[in-house]
Image (cartoon, rainbow, N blue to C red):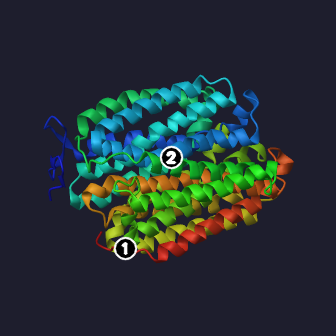
Amino acid sequence: MTVLTKSGSGAASGSESSGGRKVPIAIAMVAASLPMFMATLDNLVMTSALPVIEKELNASVGQLQWFMNAYTLCFATLMLSATTLGDRWGRRKMFVFGIGLFTAASIASALSTTPSLLIAARAFQGAGAAAIMPLSLTLLVAAVPEAKRAMAIGVWGGVSGLGIAMGPVVGGAVVDGFSWQGIFWINVPVAIVAVPLALYALRESTGRTQPLDLPGVALAGLGVFLAVWGIVHGNDDGWGSLGVVASLVGSAVALALFVLREMKTSHPVMPLRLFRSRSFSMANVIGLTFSIGIFGAVFLLSQYLQIVMGYSPFQAGLRTLPWTAAPMIFAPLAGFLAPKVGLRSLLLTGLLLQAGALFWLAALIGPDVTYGSLVPALLMAGIGMGLTFAPSSTAVLVDMDEPDHGTASSTNSTLREIGVALGIAVLTAVFLAAGGALTPLGYGDALTPALRVGGCFVLVAVVAAWFVPSHRKA
């Protein structure tokens, strides 16, 4: 079956580059997925390095959070803008620009000598990732025949999940073998390969041409930033302090104005009409709440293995493999099974496994816990992640017209990245409120309530999954 786009048609045997060459589907999938893997890897690649960076740069707990959140917030708030510019100027062109910006910011991160410089560089990294993530899926969907899209999205979901989940492993290996700066230098050779490969294998295309909604982008970014700022500073400054209350109220006002703006403008950055699709709406609720619960837990657990259990960064990363390796197997499998068993069944199974794993880990954490006792729960969480990534990505696009694919996927990616930032902020706030500290004696007891809160967020995602249409033949 032929895949039609605004710029032309594909072929059943492969995609066509801008020069008219026929490119094997496997090469097109690598071209779209490799930069996305690099971008998602940097979501959590710092988690294994944080204890080392804390000592070398004399960083506070709040600054450790902003090393992560500067990336995810810029990643989240600029994705829709990057998609709009890609539709206007060319998706492949914007994709390659994102790879270049991400790489330059990676070099700046590696050269940072103060926490402030590292936070700023991480923000620019997130801006580059914002152009990579949503456009990679759009370019991939255009590059494969319709009959193979479920499989391709399954592989894409697996690579995305693998990038996020492998962050602690790769980061730990590089920190132990070289230095914390090495986690950023490794992006340079990847980019050297990724740029020419994208130019060769991916066809240029455009979407709906419309002005960029700068007020909408500003309101959304301000709303999310103020929410995270208020949560991060709540324990230190006091939840009733003027600064924290003003931040949270300002966030609510900015987000309300954003919704009103999107309802009235003729060129919204996030078209609210997309939410008329129940599949799209529920997939976004899942993406937000699942990310809050899971990635907030990953942030804290990765440091638990070092601070409490005494493992080196690489040893800690290796011990996350029962969690991180499982999506490599189960995400492509979920993409294959989706047309047969339906999206709802896979999502419910995957999310229930993850919620159960977080509550199980919360029950296990204690002064005498051994790593071996954590393995079944870590494996359970990994299988659940693998069963969630591909079906949720499919649910986002299944009811969308092709010109809306970029906006739909970037909306979902935006909400997931907001979930990562909120998850780190919320679960760390719970951790600190329970008396948590970055010491062996002050970590374990405070981790338990944080994991339980994470499990509750994933249960919200379970409820949303119940309302996702099955789409058995999607």
Residue at the image point whose x is 65% and y is 69% from the top: 456
Residue at the image point whose x is 40% and y is 60% from the top: 264
Crowdedness near tag 1: few (<14), some (14–19) or many (≥20) residues, C-alpha within 10 Å:
some
Where, by quadrant of the figure, is residue 175 drawn?
A: top right
Q: Quadrant of the N terminus?
A: bottom left
Per the model, the C-alpha gap separating discs 2 and 1 is 38 Å
Crowdedness near tag 2: few (<14), some (14–19) or many (≥20) residues, C-alpha within 10 Å:
some
Q: Position of residue 354 (x, y in %)?
A: 58, 65
Q: Sequence order check: which comes first, mark 2 or mark 1?
A: 2
Q: Position of residue 346 (x, y in %)?
A: 44, 70
Of labels 2 and 1, the one closer to you: 2
Residue at image mark 2: 218
- Amino acid on which disc 1 is placed: Gly
- Amino acid on which disc 2 is placed: Ala
The single residue placed furthest to the right in the displayed view is 441
Question: Is the residue 15 above or below the residue 285 in the image?
Answer: above
* Nearest the eye: 79 or 26: 79
Question: Is the residue 190 above or below the residue 347 in the image?
Answer: above
The single residue placed furthest to the front in the displayed view is 264
Q: Are marks 2 and 1 in contact (CB under 8 Å)?
A: no
In this rendering, position of residue 170 left or right of residue 144: right
Disc 2, SS? helix
Q: Inspect this view and state whether residue 40 appears.
A: yes
Residue at the image point whose x is 25% and y is 40% from the top: 202
Q: Inspect this view and state whether residue 301 appears.
A: no
Q: Position of residue 98 (x, y in %)?
A: 40, 36
Q: Position of residue 351 (x, y in %)?
A: 53, 68
Residue at the image point whose x is 34% and y is 34% from the top: 96
Question: Is the residue 368 above or below the residue 47 in the image?
Answer: below
- Number of residue marks: 2
In the image, which disc is placed on residue 342? 1
